[in-house]
Image (cartoon, rainbow, N blue to C red):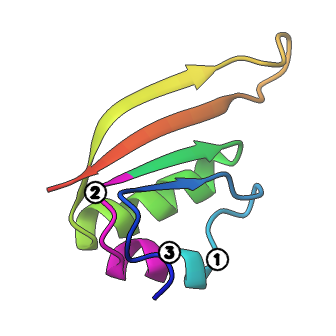
C-alpha cells in the first residue's frame, strides 16, 4: 500500500484511541517505529496491548507531559520499536 515505504508511523489519535483501520495499518505495515501521542490513557493502554502483545512492538521510550497543571490531564508520548 501507500504506507509501505515509510519507516516511522506518527499517530496522534483523539481520546478514543486508534481506529481499527489505523491499528491494522500499524500492525501490517513495514514500520520499524511508531510514535504515539496520546491524551487518552485508557485508549493508550488498549492500543499498546494490541501493538506490543500481538503486533511485535516494544516500548522503547515514554514521556508523560503535564500541559495542563492543576488538572489530571496529561499527554503521553510513546516511542515503539518493532522487535
Find disc 2 in the rendering and name its residue.
Answer: 32
Camera-side residue of 16 and 12: 12
Find disc 1 in the rendering and name its residue.
Answer: 19
Kind of element beneath mark 1: loop
Q: Of circles 1 and 2, which is in front?
A: 2
Residue 54 spot, x, y in % from top left: 25, 73
User: Badge 3, how many Cα within 10 Å: few under 14, some, many 20+?
Assistant: some
From this view, report whether residue 11 is shown above or below residue 76.
below
Residue 23 marker: 3
Residue lying at 34% horizontally and 47% vertically, measured from the top left: 80
Which segment is the magenta one? 24-33
Camera-side residue of 40 and 24: 24
- Residue 20 lies within the magenta run: no
Extreme front residue here?
5
- Residue 32 lies within the magenta run: yes
Residue 69 spot, x, y in % from top left: 82, 11
Q: Earlier in the sequence, mark 1 or mark 2?
A: 1
Kind of element beneath mark 3: helix
Is disc 1 in contact with disc 3, using a CB cutoff of under 8 Å? yes
User: Badge 1, how many Cα within 10 Å: few under 14, some, many 20+?
Assistant: few
Residue lying at 61% horizontally and 68% vertically, measured from the top left: 18
Extreme top residue here?
69
User: Badge 2, how many Cα within 10 Å: few under 14, some, many 20+?
Assistant: some
Q: CA distance from mark 3 to mark 2?
A: 14 Å
Kind of element beneath mark 2: loop
Residue 68 spot, x, y in % from top left: 84, 18
Amino acid at each position: 500500500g501507500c504506507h509501505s515505504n515509510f519507516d516511522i508511523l506518527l499517530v496522534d489519535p483523539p481520546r478514543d484511541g486508534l481506529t481499527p483501520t489505523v491499528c491494522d495499518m500499524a500492525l501490517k505495515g513495514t514500520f520499524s517505529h511508531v510514535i504515539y501521542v496520546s491524551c487518552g490513557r485508557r485508549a493508550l493502554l488498549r492500543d499498546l496491548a494490541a501493538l506490543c502483545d500481538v503486533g511485535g512492538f516494544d516500548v522503547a521510550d515514554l514521556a508523560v507531559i503535564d500541559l495542563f497543571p492543576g488538572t489530571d490531564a496529561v499527554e503521553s508520548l510513546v516511542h515503539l520499536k518493532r522487535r
